[in-house]
Amino acid sequence: MRILTQLLLGGLLFFLVAAAAEEKFGVPVFAGATFDQQNSEAAAKNSKRPTACYITKATVAQVNAFYKKQSGVVVLNDSTHSGLFIFGSVNVSTQSPWPDAKDKQVRNDTLITLIKTE
């Protein structure tokens, strides 16, 4: 039982470290956020730039706090319902509520959008 517990804890630790280490365009992705293919494609079509959208149940304030702590960040906006951060050639925005590109419904979770500007 002890070995099984150690294996499970070791696997959980590996999963948490791997999730925290995810990056897109060289910028860390908020841990636990889920990639959204359809919204990414819609945003890339609109911006005409490489774009990745992620969704999380965390609040905008929690996500903004994460990005404000990152090295090399320029904070352009940090408010209750949105954020805008620049990491070199990557813009990161956060927002809630937001309109889902799939069905145009307003969602109240948090959308994180990364756009590569160069």
Image (cartoon, helix red, strand yellow):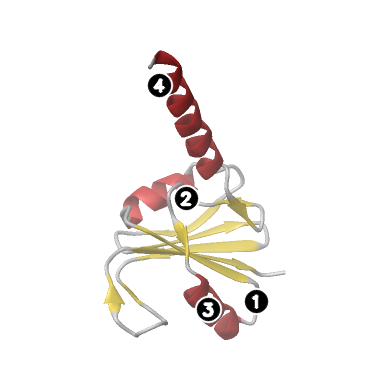
Please name the residue that numbered disc 1 is placed on: 49
Quick one: label 2, few (<14), some, or many (20+) residues within 10 Å?
many
Given residues 118 and 51, the one toward you in this image is 51
- Measured in 3D between alpha carbons, the distance from the residue under mark 3 to the one under mark 2, in whole angstroms, is 19 Å
Quarter where residue 49 is shown: bottom right
Give x and y (percent) for residue 116.
Answer: 65, 67
Quick one: label 3, few (<14), some, or many (20+) residues within 10 Å?
many
Given residues 75 and 11, the one toward you in this image is 11
- Measured in 3D between alpha carbons, the distance from the residue under mark 1 to the one under mark 2, in whole angstroms, is 21 Å
Q: Mark 3: which secondary structure?
A: helix
- Measured in 3D between alpha carbons, the distance from the residue under mark 3 to the one under mark 1, in whole angstroms, is 8 Å
Instruction: Decide which of tag 3 and tag 2 comes sooner along the chain.
Output: 2
Instruction: Decide which of tag 1 and tag 2 comes sooner along the chain.
Output: 2
Residues at circles 4 and 1 in contact by the CB criterion of under 8 Å: no
Up-down: is 104 above or below 5? below
Please name the residue that numbered disc 4 is placed on: 5
